[in-house]
Image (cartoon, rainbow, N blue to C red):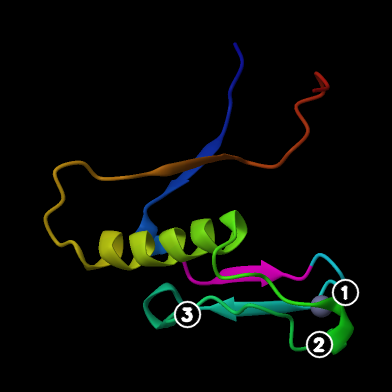
Amino acid sequence: MTVEKHWSMTPKDIKRIILVCKNCGATIGYKPQQWKYVPVKCSNCPADVGEMHPASADYTYLNVLRETLAKAIQNENPFFEVRFEFDDGEDDGEGT
Ligand SMILES: [Zn+2]
């Protein structure tokens, strides 16, 4: 018998959304209900690194994620409860 452990959570369980700069590794965290905008640049990187264009796919998906999380958390009576499932993070010894 194999026992597998999985964790699941709902959008309301999310404590912070963490954005990680791919250039320098700096992080910025937002509580989902307080995440009011998507930053277009990293405050830790020099100006010549540039910024994310608001019409880019990266910006669009982050903004959709931000708006969707806020709506999912505010919805007190959803038709479906959304759950995210995670492995327990332990190596099962079977490789990948
Ligand atoms: Zn950075």
Q: Amino acid at mark 3?
A: Tyr
Tell me which segment is drawn in magenta.
14-21
Check disc 3: other Cα within 10 Å, few if <14, some if 14-19, many if 20+.
few
Q: Amino acid at mark 1?
A: Cys
10 and 68: which one is in front? Answer: 68
Image location of residue 46, percent across then percent down: 87, 87
- Mark 1 falls on what kind of element? loop
Which quadrant holds residue 67? Answer: bottom left
Earlier sequence position, callout 1 versus callout 3: 1
In this rendering, position of residue 28 left or right of residue 31: right
State ligand 1's quadrant.
bottom right
Where 43 sits versus 91, above or below?
Answer: below
Residue position marked by numbered label 1 in the rendering: 24
Question: Does the magenta portion include 18?
Answer: yes
Which quadrant holds residue 53? Answer: bottom right
Check disc 1: other Cα within 10 Å, few if <14, some if 14-19, many if 20+.
few
Asked if residue 12 shows in the view, the reply is no
Q: How many marks?
A: 3
Which quadrant holds residue 45? Answer: bottom right
Residue position marked by numbered label 3 in the rendering: 37
- Residue at horizontal 56 percent and vertical 34 percent from the top: 5
Quarter of the image containing the N terminus?
Answer: top right
In this rendering, position of residue 74 left or right of residue 23: left
Earlier sequence position, callout 2 versus callout 3: 3
Distance from the alpha carbon under mark 2 to that under mark 1:
8 Å
Query: Is disc 2's CB within 8 Å of ligand 1?
Result: yes
Query: Is disc 1's CB within 8 Å of ligand 1?
Result: yes
Check disc 2: other Cα within 10 Å, few if <14, some if 14-19, many if 20+.
few
Residue position marked by numbered label 2 in the rendering: 44
